[in-house]
């Protein structure tokens, strides 16, 4: 979505996916981090094959995965593959890179006395939009522009809102996330603190750019918070 170039490149020897951004673009630092983190990602994530910086452009050449974007709707056969990929990711060591910490990332939205509950040492993706997952015989997590270091249960919490936006009820999305061990062990007060912060974040996103899907995500963030607050 944020790339100046996003294309399939067919050469004599290979078919690649290439994404690029001007080196002076405000998002250039995110692509820098995306390139740096790639060698540390699970095997299911596409490999970065080369990086070229020339003529004011920063280009990344990835192995191209022939698959379809994830189907998050209830009953989709993609759902077990997605949870498996997330479990695999949560067993991946977080590399020693300048990755933003969760307590920093949500500091403007969580109360000061709660934000430290988001801390942890798990490598998080934090953006489980349906088009950031490619499905073959497994799920491939792509687009690593926003890696975060934090509590392991944050990624399942992020996934839950995407499931709700695809038609799952809050209890059904919660049940799906409970297949991920970190969510089973998530401290209730910490999840509430994050859910409150995430609802504020989505409110801000929807106000600044009121596209229907963003307003829908904001609504589901509040629906989730209501459910979690009342959950036995």
Image (cartoon, rainbow, N blue to C red):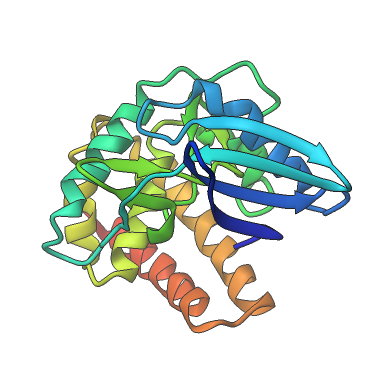
Q: Nearer the viewer, residue 29 or 216?
A: 29
* Tag count: 0
Q: Residue 51: x, y in percent?
A: 69, 33
| Residue 186 visible in the picture | yes
Give 10 or 7, whichever is nearer the viewer: 10
Q: Position of residue 159 (x, y in %)?
A: 36, 52
Residue 112 can be seen, yes or no: no
Closer-to-camera residue (25/206): 25
Q: Which quadrant of the view contains residue 230?
A: bottom left
Q: Residue at x 31, y 56 (%)?
A: 228
Tell me the quadrant of the picture where the N terminus can be found.
Answer: bottom right
Position of 80 relative to 26 (above/below): above
Is residue 24 rendered to the left or right of residue 49?
A: right
Please report the residue visible at 25 percent of the width from the left and 46 percent of the height from the top: 136
Q: Residue at x 34, y 70 (%)?
A: 165
Image-quadrant location for residue 29: top right
Q: Where 117 sits versus 5, above or below?
A: above
Please provide percent x and percent y for residue 2.
Answer: 66, 60
**Picture coordinates of residue 186 (x, y %)?**
33, 35
Which quadrant holds residue 76?
A: bottom left
Horizontal side of 14 relative to 177 (left or right) equals right
């Amino acid at each position: 979505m944020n790339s100046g170039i996003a294309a399939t490149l067919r050469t004599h020897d290979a078919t690649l996916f290439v994404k690029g951004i001007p080196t002076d673009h405000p998002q250039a630092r995110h692509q820098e981090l995306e390139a740096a983190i790639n060698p540390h990602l699970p095997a299911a994530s596409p490999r970065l094959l080369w990086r070229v910086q020339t003529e004011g452009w920063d280009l990344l050449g990835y192995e191209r995965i022939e698959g379809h974007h994830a189907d998050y709707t209830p009953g989709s056969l993609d759902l077990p593959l997605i949870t498996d990929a997330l479990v695999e990711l949560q067993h991946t060591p977080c590399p020693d890179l300048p990755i933003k910490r969760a307590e920093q990332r949500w500091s403007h939205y969580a109360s000061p006395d709660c934000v430290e509950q988001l801390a942890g040492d798990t490598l998080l993706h934090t953006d489980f939009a349906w088009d950031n997952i490619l499905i073959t015989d497994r799920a491939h997590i792509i687009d690593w522009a926003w890696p975060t270091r934090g509590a392991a249960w944050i990624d399942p919490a992020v996934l839950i809102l995407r499931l709700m936006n695809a038609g799952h009820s809050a209890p059904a999305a919660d049940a799906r996330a409970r297949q991920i061990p970190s969510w089973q062990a998530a401290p209730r007060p910490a999840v509430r603190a994050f859910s409150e912060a995430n609802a504020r974040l989505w409110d801000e996103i929807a106000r600044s750019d009121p596209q229907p899907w963003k307003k829908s995500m904001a609504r589901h963030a509040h629906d989730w918070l209501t459910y979690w607050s009342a959950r036995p």
